[in-house]
Structures are given as structure tokens and as C-alpha cells.
Amino acid sequence: MQSTCLIFGAGYLGQRVAALWRDDSRKVHVVTRSAARAEALAAAGYRPHVADVTRPETLAPLPDTDTVLFAVGFDRGSGRSIGEVYAGGLASVLAALGDRPRRFLYISSTGVYGPGDGGWVDEETPCHPDREGGQACLAAEQTLAASSLGPRSIILRLAGIYGPGRIPRAADLLAGKPLAAHPDTHLNLIHVDDAARIVLLAEQAAAPRTYVVSDGHPVLRRHYFAELARLLSAPAPTFISPPADGPPQRG
């Protein structure tokens, strides 16, 4: 019998997971807010559903699936807060799914840990997020853990994702814009293709579990952006404090 998957958030990471599942002869359903995007997804061999996780009335009916991936990103132009999208959207999805999926995979962030002292972080490190994005991710994790799908869930706390067409802050460096980041904190990254493969591995892991997902080579943001500016022949980086209401500062 053909296995079925459902993805909320077919963005930079989600679309790669979708392709891996499709190429493994899985039946892949994808939820998108855009009708135009739905047409493109259908042409790529997926089964699209036009819905919005912040509007529960659009989430019915959802297909019966073996595995669900929640990889929804935050769109500042959506008119919703990051908490409404991450925690509220996840709660709506869980209510719409009921007890049907065998496995639920949630893409969280290392932003749930908050500021640290420069020491190593692992799955047992206490979470004290100081930014709204990290707080929203942690609230979503707690919502999932308390749900009927909690015992079948895997939480992946991803470091900053990079890859083709997405090098963190490259455009800002080239434009000479100040970077909204703390220069003497560590930056942890994960390549998008590695992250996609880890999602597939996590599907087979014993649940419930939480994993920190990083390439394991942290670097100070000051040094990373200085080297990136050199490679891009861009001006030397300058820094300003990040906004409290932005997406989680991964790493």
C-alpha cells in the first residue's frame, strides 16, 4: 500500500522534503495559501490543498495521511503575529487532523533556547527564549506535546538554514545595511539538503523525541559575517540589536 504524506509549508525546506518523498514513491499532499502555488505544485506531481493554518475553517477536509510535516514559516505580510502562525496555526492543524496520522513532524528552531553563555546546547538544555519568535516556537512545541499526537511526534530544532539562493544576510551585506544580530554570539547553521534528509530519518525514529539539528560547527557571528563580506567583496559588517518581535534567531 502506498504511503501518504501531508506537508504544511512547502517553502525552502518543505519543498525539498516533498521531492524526497515523491521520489520515494510516496503520495504527497501539500497545503498552500496560494492558488497559483497550488497549480505549480500539482504540475510537480503533488496533491495541493489551498488552506491557511490561521483560518481553521479552511482546513477541512484534510486527507488521511501516515505522516504530517509542519514546516510553516512566518510571512510578515500575512497580517498575523508570529505566535498566531506558529502556535495558533499548529493548534488549528492538530484539531483538524484528530488522531489520524501515524507520525507528526514539527520544524522548530534553536531560537527556543534564548541567549546562552557560549556553552554547548543539547536537547536537555533548558529553554528560555527572549524573542517573540523563539517563544512562539516553544509554545508550539508545548501545544504539540499536550495533544493526542504528542506521543507520535518528533520535534526538530533547526539551526539557521542555508543553501542555494539562501546565504544568511548576503543581500544586506552587499547593500551595506547594518545586521540585526548580536556579533559576539554564536551562529549555528545547517544546509537545507541535510535538513531535508534528517526529516526523513526522523520519520523513522522512536517517538516522542526532540532533536537539535545543526552542522556542529558554531562560529561567532562577527567572524562569519566578516568572512562572508570578504568573499562577496562587500563592505565590512556593522551590527544593530535585533527586534524582539522577529523570527527566532537561530543558533
Image: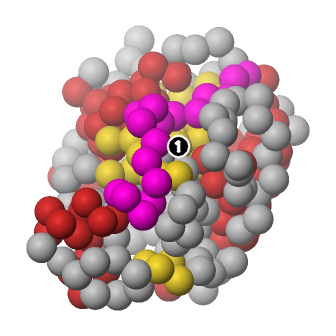
SS class of the residue under badge 1?
Answer: strand
Out of 40 and 83, give the one closest to the viewer. 83
Q: Is residue 102 above or below residue 90?
A: above
Out of 114 and 25, give the one closest to the viewer. 114
Residue 78 in sight here: no
Q: Residue at x 54, y 62 (%)?
A: 184
Which residue lies under the disc numbered 1? 158
Q: Quadrant of residue 81?
A: bottom right
Out of 21 and 166, give the one closest to the viewer. 166
Residue 208 in sight here: yes
Q: Residue at x 52, y 14 (%)?
A: 204
- Residue 182 coordinates in the image, percent (x, y): 56, 69
The magenta span reads 208-224
Label 1 sits on what residue type? Answer: Leu
Q: Residue at x 87, y 38 (%)?
A: 146
Q: Judge from the rendering whether residue 247 lies leftward or rightward of residue 192; answer left or right.
A: right
Is 213 part of what is drawn in magenta?
yes
- Residue 183 coordinates in the image, percent (x, y): 50, 67
Out of 226 and 64, give the one closest to the viewer. 226
Mark 1: give few (<14), some (14-19) or many (20+) Cα within 10 Å: many
Is 239 part of what is drawn in magenta?
no
